[in-house]
Image (tube, rainbow, N blue to C red):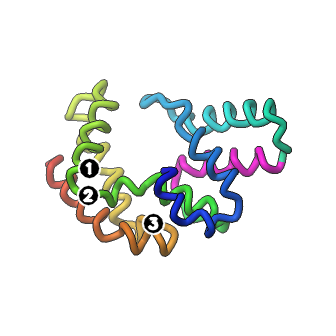
Amino acid sequence: MFSELDDIKNNIENFEAVSFAVFYHDVIYNVVSKSNEEKSAEVARKNLQKLGFDSTFIQKVSDQIIATKFHKQSDDNDINYLLDADLSILGSESEKYVSYTQKIRKEYSIYPDLLYKPGRKKVLEHFLKSESIFKTEYFKEKYELRARKNILSEIESLS
């Protein structure tokens, strides 16, 4: 995510906050938990308080981390850049995307194909139903078409 954001850091209002959000957004990750983002945000809050950051900054980082839970368009462009960087793997070259999907499957190996495939397909179809997967023009131009092709290919492989 850092490499994705590095080229556009001048477009980001508070790159320091986004950087902390990138670092902490998956610090707590359990595939069966529905509160990973909240727990990750809490770890970030505690650590940033220890480092002496003010409450406004800490809240900004926390809000950015929480935003990665649902990936909804935001009025805050920094959040949109963060979300797009988080999803940039969807628009990667096909070999890299296939490797990513294999890692996702491994993460969710506790679920048999009978459960995994329909769940994964539902997530992927949600992306395709969106007017755009990406929220910022930069990421739309860079990845939208390839992301849609990758997702369609993955859906076919799940059938």
Q: CA distance from mark 3 to mark 1?
A: 19 Å
- Which residue matches tag 2? 93
Instruction: Look at label 2 and name its amino acid.
Output: Glu
- Which residue matches tag 3? 134
Q: Residue at x 27, y 36 (%)?
A: 105
Closest to the observer, 149 or 125? 149
Sequence-wise, the earlier of marks 2 and 3 is 2
Closest to the observer, 47 or 76? 47
Q: CA distance from mark 2 to mark 3?
A: 17 Å
Please report contact status of discs 3 and 1: CB closer than 8 Å, yes or no: no
Residue 19 as seen in the image, left or right of residue 152? right
Q: Is residue 2 above or below residue 42?
A: below
Q: Residue at x 75, y 36 (%)?
A: 48
Instruction: Look at label 3 and name its amino acid.
Output: Phe
Q: Main secondary structure of the magenta part?
A: helix
Q: Residue 42: x percent and y percent?
A: 69, 33
Q: CA distance from mark 1 to mark 2?
A: 5 Å
Task: Count neighbours of disc 2 (C-alpha within 10 A) and say few if under 14, some if 14 to 19, many if 20 or more.
Answer: few
Task: Count neighbours of disc 1 (C-alpha within 10 A) and say few if under 14, some if 14 to 19, many if 20 or more.
Answer: few
Q: Nearer the viewer, mark 2 or mark 3?
A: 2
Give the magenta range.
56-71
Instruction: Look at label 1 and name its amino acid.
Output: Lys
Closest to the observer, 7 or 70? 7
In the image, is residue 47 part of the stretch drawn in magenta? no
Q: Residue at x 26, y 58 (%)?
A: 93
Mark identifier at residue 96:
1
Please report contact status of discs 1 and 2: CB closer than 8 Å, yes or no: yes
